[in-house]
Each structure stands twice: as C-alpha cells, then as structure tokens.
Image: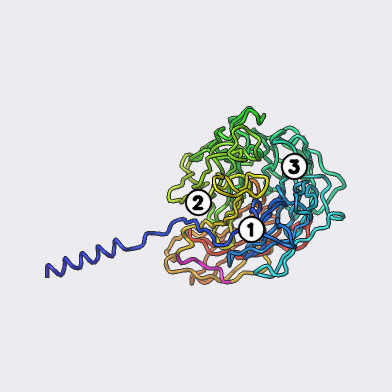
C-alpha cells in the first residue's frame, strides 16, 4: 500500500509539472508580408484594415506600378493592393458618420519610376463601406479637381467630431527640413462647411514642432489639442481657443519630437474627460544640428482632467518604465491602455539630426510593450510584467491598431526615403506584420451572438450572449465598451475612443442589456465596435453604426 501511495504521488507530481501555464501575452508573426510599409492603418470593417504608405517603390504591385495602399484581411492575414491616386504619405484620417473612411492630406512629391502619383497635400480619399469580407470590389474614390481640401496640408491631424464630420488641424504646405517652417496655421472641415480655413493662434504659437497635433473630441463637443508643449480647448461652435497649462518640465510631444497621447475611457453618468500624454523629449533645442539620434527620450507621462477642477490642478506627472520617442497609446476594451513601439532615444523624421543610424533619427528601439491602468494609484499604473518582446523594431512610420477580434495589429517602420532592406541595416523598411494577442485570446471567451446594425443614442439595447462557465461566478466584473478603433499614423491614434456603457447580464446569463451614450457629443455618430468584458476576458467585437448612419453633418 505504501508503494502504491508513493506511485500515485509521483504520478500527480508529473502531471503538475506537465500542466500548461496560464496563457500570457504573445506576439504572432504573420506569414504574409504587408507589401507596403504600413505607416498608416485604420479598421474599416469587421474583417478589413486599410494601410497607406508613401508613393514609392514598395514591392506590392497594382496596375504595373508599386502600390501605396493596401487592404489587410484580418481573417486570413493576407494583403491585396488598393489603387490610390494621390500621395498619402504622412496623411491623417477617420471614419465619418455614414461609415465612410476619409483620408486627408499628404505628400507633394512624386517618385522616380512610379509615374502615376499626384500631389497629396489637398487630397481627400474616400473608402466607402464595403460589404465584402475579403475586399472584393472595395475601392478608394478620389477626384482631386472637385474634391479637395481648402489648404495644402502635409502632416495634419483629423478627428470625427460631434456632427459626424471631420475637423482637420494644422500640417505644412510643402517639404521642409525637420521643423515646420511652411506651416498650415488653420482648421477646416470635411465635408466643407466654410469657404476659408479658420486661422489658429494656437498653431502659430506652438511652432516650430507642431506637426500631427494630438487632438481629442470632448464629450461637450469642444476639442482638446496638444502641440509642441502647449495645450488648448477649442470651441468649434464659438470659434474660440482657451489656453490651458503647458506640459510640465519642458517636454515636447509632437512631430518631429514625437510623444503620444490618448483620451482615457469615458464613464457614465458624467463622462468626465482625461487625457494622457506620454513620451517625447525634454529639450530647449530645436536645431537639428544640435540634436542627435542618441538624445534621450523622456519617460514622462502627463495626465490632465478636463473639468474646471482638473484644469485648475493642472497636469499630473508619472513615468513609463523607459524613455520613449514615437510610442503609441491604444485602448484595450477593459479600459487599460497599451504603450507600444518607439525608441529610447532620438527623433522622428529621416537623416536630419546628428549621428543618424543609417537614415534613422532614432536609436535603441523599445521592443517590450507596457500596460497603463488608469484607475490604479499614481506610481503603480504602468507595468510590463508578463509582456513579451516583439523582436522587431517599430520606430518611425510604424502603426498599431486594436482589431474587432480583440488583439492588436502591428506593422510598418521605415526611417528611410524609399524601400531600404538588406544585411547590416539596423532600421530597414519593415514589411513584417504581427499581432499582439492578449491572454484572453487563448481561453473561452464571452460572445455577443448578435447586435442591431444601428444603435440609437440614449437607448436601452438587449442582445443575446453566451458566457463560458468559468466566467459565471457571482460578482464577476462586467464591462461593456463602445469603441472607435481610430486611425494610426505617426505615433498617434486619432479619433480613438472608449465609452463605457451601463450594462447588466440577465439572470439566465443569456442576454446583455446596455444603455447607449446620451448623444453624439459623448460618442460622435459613426461606426463603433461593442465589446463585452467579464473579469478581463473580452469577447470579439460587434461592429455597429452608432446613430442614424446619415452623412455628415448630422446632429444626434
């Protein structure tokens, strides 16, 4: 009997040693390459992501020339070229209230050997909603003669605002060396609402490092903006700028001194907005001859609550685990924020500061992402425990986006003026695509079994769900998030938004009832993704239209 007991103990010990560990975060390298450098990315349907690059010599071909647009299929991890007329390099974009994607601005330049390129500074590129899951028949519409911006804009920012239209901010007119010396100091709208752009003293004051301003639609309809080290609240309806406190400690955060920023999750009933700004560089110097690829990036994160009490208190400072130039901040459906990509030293742009690494103005790529937990105590919000290394540098001209599947799609990186690959190149043109998969991708997940195609504002909605047994404990934490997945370009995820909705699960655990946001100021009307999270295990997203689906402007 004693020998039998020992044998059992040995067997149990062996089973314990062989038991799989709890799932963790994982990078997954896709077999297919992107074919173009995915320096801009936006999810346009439950299965498709649009990539844009500069018009140059990328390997993906269309109509007997290099493509600079592409559709990535999230289901099959495959790519197909997208025909683009104007040069989309360093453009911005967002989804509109009717579900169309608008890409705006871009590069004035052509490229030798690729003759079909038209200047992009005033371009408006429209990708209309496409029912095809694999991209068949999906096209981009452009008409440069009749459909164009009022002002030339390269390196602008754009966001969807409360009426479902785009506010387009800043940029530069022509190719300038490093700093913004030929600036577009104005705002305009798409669709066009006025005959001339609106001048901005904020953009003038924030020169010379104010490209790709970090801009956010607030839940009262105003817009918070950060450029260089300065911030304002812009009242669109009154056309006024309210100056807010500068980012502390002389930290600068917009191109070519890139940090990143994000609007933290909005929660009912008050939807009080807070903005987090991370990375960039602490400097008094803007002359590229006095800057270096080895200039340390800052680890500083600055956070401000944008009500009167929070504005009076000013910015709250905390620190990442390392300095990062060109990071990107992206929401998780549970309210955490992923901090990914970037470099520990240097700057954006190409071969313009001292000690370039090949053509790169930056060095020491940060390969391990971190998580920011907004409701954790100050000093304990940022961690990379359990986070893997990507193994691939994602520096200038990288992109990342949350997908409707719940993981992150990561591509790009190209601090070069064309396709630059080969042995010995530390920062090549990067065509490899990865996903970063959260732990919940490897366990049984809740499911939203169906959802209306359109959701009305300020309404109660009930949808069928299924919940795995492991998530049915009494008192489980239930979160329902309504998300705009945003447009990734140049270390900024414009229009990215997460609004939590009051929700409850039925006693039989077969249905979920949630209350949608009260109006289009809290969540600008347009496409959205609904996620159900139970104890940090998140469902796949349900792709819906928040609001009527009318063309902009539409007040809802």
- The span from disc 1 to disc 2 (Cα, nearest Å) is 20 Å
154 sits to left or right of 444: right
Measuring from the top left, give residue 372's x and y in whole percent.
51, 46
Q: Which mark is residue 472?
A: none
Crowd class of label 1 (few under 14; some 14 to 19; many from 20; radius 10 Å): many
* Viewport quadrant of the C terminus: bottom right
If you read the primary sequence from the N terminus, does the residue marked by circle 2 or circle 3 appear first?
3
Task: Tell whether position 329 is magenta.
Answer: no
Q: Which mark is residue 35?
A: 1
Q: Say what secondary structure mark 3 lies in.
A: loop
188 sits to left or right of 289: right
The residue lying toward the viewer, choosing from 397 and 209, is: 397
Q: In the picture shown, does residue 59 fall above or below 260?
A: below
Q: Residue at x 87, y 47 (%)?
A: 195
The residue lying toward the viewer, choosing from 155 and 169, is: 155
All told, the count of numbered labels is 3
Q: In the picture shown, does residue 142 fall above or below 304?
A: below
Measuring from the top left, give residue 86's x and y in whole percent.
78, 53
Q: Say what secondary structure mark 2 lies in.
A: loop
Give the quarter of the image for residue 136. Answer: bottom right
Highlighted magenta segment, given as a residue range: 443-449
* Viewport quadrant of the N terminus: bottom left
Q: Residue at x 66, y 57 (%)?
A: 59
Whether residue 268 is visible, yes or no, is no
Q: In the picture shown, does residue 296 fall above or below 487?
A: above
Q: Which mark is residue 390?
A: 2
Crowd class of label 2 (few under 14; some 14 to 19; many from 20; radius 10 Å): many
């Amino acid at each position: 009997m004693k020998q039998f007991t020992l044998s059992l103990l040995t067997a149990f010990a062996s089973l314990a040693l062989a038991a799989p560990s709890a799932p963790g975060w994982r990078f997954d390298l896709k077999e297919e390459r992107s074919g173009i450098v995915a320096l801009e990315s936006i999810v346009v349907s439950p299965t498709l992501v649009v990539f844009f690059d500069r018009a140059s010599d990328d390997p993906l071909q269309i109509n007997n020339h290099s493509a600079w647009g592409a559709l990535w299929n999230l289901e099959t991890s495959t790519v197909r070229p997208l025909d683009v007329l104007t040069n989309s390099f360093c453009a911005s974009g967002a989804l509109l209230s009717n579900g169309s994607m608008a890409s705006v601005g871009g590069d004035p330049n052509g490229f030798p050997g690729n003759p079909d390129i038209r200047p992009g500074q005033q371009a408006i590129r429209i990708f209309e909603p496409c029912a095809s899951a694999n991209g068949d028949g999906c096209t981009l519409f452009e008409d440069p003669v009749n459909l164009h911006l009022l002002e030339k804009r390269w390196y602008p920012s754009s966001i969807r605002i409360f009426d479902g239209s785009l506010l387009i901010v800043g940029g530069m007119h022509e190719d300038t060396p490093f700093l913004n010396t030929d600036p577009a100091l104005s705002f305009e709208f798409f669709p066009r609402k006025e005959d001339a752009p609106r001048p901005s003293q904020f953009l003038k004051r924030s020169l010379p490092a104010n490209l790709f301003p970090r801009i956010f639609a607030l839940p009262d309809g105003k817009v918070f903006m950060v450029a260089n080290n300065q911030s304002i609240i812009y009242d669109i309806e009154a056309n006024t700028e309210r100056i807010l406190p500068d980012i502390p400690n002389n930290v600068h955060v917009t191109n070519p001194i890139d940090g990143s920023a994000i609007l933290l999750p909005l929660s009912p009933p008050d939807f009080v907005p807070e903005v987090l700004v991370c990375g960039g560089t602490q400097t008094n110097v803007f002359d590229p001859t006095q800057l270096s690829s080895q200039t340390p990036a800052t680890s500083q994160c600055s956070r401000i609550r944008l009500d009167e009490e929070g504005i009076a208190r000013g910015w709250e400072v905390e620190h990442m685990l390392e300095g990062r130039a060109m990071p990107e901040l992206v929401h998780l459906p549970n309210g955490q924020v992923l901090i990914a990509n970037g470099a520990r030293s240097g700057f954006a742009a190409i071969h313009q500061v001292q000690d370039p690494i090949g053509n790169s103005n930056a060095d020491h790529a940060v390969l391990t992402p971190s998580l920011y937990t907004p409701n954790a105590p100050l000093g304990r919000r940022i961690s990379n425990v359990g986070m893997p290394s990507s193994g691939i540098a994602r520096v200038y001209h990288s992109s990342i986006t949350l997908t409707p599947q719940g993981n992150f799609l990561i591509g790009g990186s190209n601090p070069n003026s064309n396709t630059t690959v080969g042995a010995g190149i530390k920062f090549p043109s990067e065509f490899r695509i990865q996903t970063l998969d959260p732990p919940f991708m490897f366990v049984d997940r809740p499911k939203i079994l169906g959802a209306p195609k359109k959701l009305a504002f300020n309404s109660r909605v009930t949808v069928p769900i299924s919940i795995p047994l492991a998530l049915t404990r009494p008192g489980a934490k239930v979160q329902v998030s309504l998300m705009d997945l945003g447009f990734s370009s140049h270390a900024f995820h414009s229009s990215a938004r997460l609004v939590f909705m009051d929700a409850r699960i039925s006693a039989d655990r077969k249905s979920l009832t949630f209350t949608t946001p009260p109006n289009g100021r809290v969540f600008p009307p347009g496409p959205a993704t609904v996620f159900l999270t139970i104890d940090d295990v998140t469902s796949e997203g349900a792709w819906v239209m928040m609001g009527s689906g009318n063309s902009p402007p539409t007040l809802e």
